[in-house]
Structures are given as structure tokens and as C-alpha cells.
């Protein structure tokens, strides 16, 4: 059973701080990695995709991938209260074409 | 530029009735995925379809659930003889044809909230 593991949280950070979200996955052959944000009662929306080892930055967001350690992370700089949401780590399955999601980490940014 | 369209947004069914959930993918997208999300839980993969083909249904319950994506019209997720445990949010997502090694990002619809009474 291929799995994606996340700390369910909640993770609480003060406004302006860096939020660090982590994820591990079991499928060594995975090539595609994604972070989605989901507000309560809403649908997931893509924040970042990453396919190669290293860092990828987009505005206040940085995704980090280490395939050898089977580890993906998301850093949110200058966290804002509007960043409060559940963050879903997702990994492409090499056995087929589906994307497997972790259970999500709830983030609270305190004003 | 319409996104993924799902309907209805909310659906209430009594135990034993049938539920039909519809999904139209984004323009230019040929791959459709259905996911189920129980309260306070992550997204669970159910089925992946292309036009007129079920590619991967490994996440579908063996009984009562079926999905299709006909040549014309939306994808349909059908749940027969619903039970209370089927109450959940059902999300449809679409992606373009693959142009790289690995998966393309998914674009999600607003979901259908199914309540079984």
C-alpha cells in the first residue's frame, strides 16, 4: 500500500513567522510531487508542484524535495492569517497515473 | 475559461436511494479523477477515467459504486443503494494529457456534498 504521511497538526505559528510543513512518501519511483491548500468546506487548490531534487520557490512559498530520503517539504515565509488552512501533500503514483494524497496538516497563523 | 464543473453542490438521499454525481472537466483536459473526502480526513482516490475508458478503479468499493466517462457528456459517479457511511464530499479533478515523466497537477471542482439520511 503506497502511502503519503503528514503530521496532522495543528501547526500554530505567529503572523510573520516561517511555517514548515513536512511529508514523507513510500513509493521510491515517484516522480511528481505537489502541495495543495484546502480551506474549510472548499476544494483543494494547487500551490506548488516539484519534480526534481532541490528547492523551488514561488513567492512566499518554497517546496523542497529529497528523493533519496523520500521527503518533501513546504515552507511558507511571512505567514499571514489568510494562510490558515489544511495543506495536502500529494505524490504521483508510478504504478498507474493516480495521485495519492496525505491526510493533510492543519495550519493556524495567529495574528 | 471554465474550470472543472461539478453538480449538484449538495445532494441529500435517503438510505437505499441512488446518488448520481456529475463532472465536466476543464476544457482541453481528457483525464478525470474522482476522490472521496470524509470529514477531517484526506482525499481518497476512487477512480481514474479517460473518454470511454476506466483506467484505474482500484479505489472504488467493489459493490454499489460505478463510474463512467462517455464520449459525449460529463463523467458520472453513481452510488446505488446509498448507506449513511457514503456521506462525504466527492471531488472530481481533471488534468491534461501527460507531457512529462510523472503526473500533471490536478484541477479540482467544487465538490458534491452527499448526505445520506
Image (spheres, coloured by chain):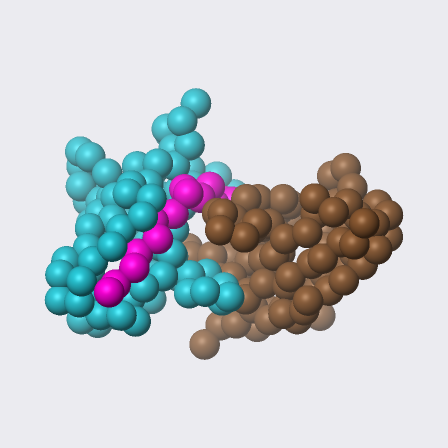
Chain colours: A brown, B cyan
Q: What residue is shown at x 71% (from left), y 70% (from top)?
A: A69
Outermost residue on the right side: it is A16
Q: What residue is shown at x 52% (from left), y 72% (from top)?
A: A3
In the displayed structure, B116 sits above or below B4; it is: below
Outermost residue on the front side: it is B117
In the displayed structure, B36 sits above or below A61; it is: below
Give the number of marks: 0
Outermost residue on the top side: it is B1
Magenta residues, start to end: B102-117
Residue A1: quadrant of the picture: bottom left
Q: What residue is shown at x 77% (from left), y 37% (from top)?
A: A59
Evaluate whether residue A39 shows in this view: yes
Which of these two is toward me, B78 or B10? B10
Is residue A67 left or right of A44 when viewed as pictured? right
Q: Position of residue A77 (x, y in %)?
A: 82, 47
Q: In the rendered image, which quarter contains the C terminus of chain B?
A: bottom left
Residue B103 falls within the magenta-colored stretch? yes
Q: Position of residue B90 (x, y in %)?
A: 35, 54
Is residue A42 left or right of A67 when viewed as pictured? left
Evaluate whether residue A70 shows in this view: no
Residue B72: quadrant of the picture: top left
Residue B40 falls within the magenta-colored stretch? no
Amino acid at each position: 500500500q503506497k502511502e503519503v504521511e503528514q503530521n496532522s497538526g495543528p501547526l500554530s505559528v505567529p503572523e510573520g513567522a516561517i511555517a514548515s510543513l513536512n511529508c514523507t512518501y513510500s513509493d521510491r519511483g515517484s516522480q511528481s510531487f505537489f502541495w495543495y491548500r484546502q480551506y474549510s468546506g472548499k476544494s483543494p487548490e494547487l500551490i506548488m508542484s516539484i519534480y526534481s531534487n532541490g528547492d523551488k520557490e514561488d513567492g512566499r512559498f518554497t517546496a523542497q524535495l529529497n528523493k533519496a530520503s523520500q521527503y518533501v517539504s513546504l515552507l511558507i515565509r511571512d505567514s499571514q492569517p489568510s494562510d490558515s488552512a489544511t495543506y495536502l501533500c500529494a505524490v504521483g503514483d508510478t504504478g498507474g497515473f493516480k495521485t495519492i494524497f496525505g491526510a493533510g496538516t492543519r495550519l493556524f497563523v495567529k495574528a | 475559461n471554465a474550470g472543472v464543473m461539478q453538480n449538484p453542490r449538495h445532494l441529500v438521499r435517503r438510505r437505499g436511494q441512488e446518488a448520481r454525481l456529475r463532472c465536466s472537466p476543464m476544457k482541453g483536459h481528457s483525464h478525470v479523477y474522482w476522490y472521496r473526502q470524509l470529514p477531517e480526513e484526506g482525499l481518497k482516490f476512487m477512480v481514474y477515467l479517460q473518454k470511454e475508458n476506466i483506467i484505474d478503479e482500484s479505489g472504488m468499493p467493489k459493490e454499489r459504486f460505478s463510474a463512467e466517462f462517455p464520449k459525449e457528456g460529463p463523467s458520472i459517479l453513481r452510488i446505488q443503494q446509498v448507506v449513511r457511511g457514503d456521506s462525504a464530499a466527492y471531488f472530481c479533478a481533471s488534468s491534461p494529457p501527460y507531457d512529462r515523466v510523472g503526473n500533471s497537477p490536478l484541477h479540482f471542482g467544487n465538490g458534491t456534498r452527499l448526505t445520506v439520511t
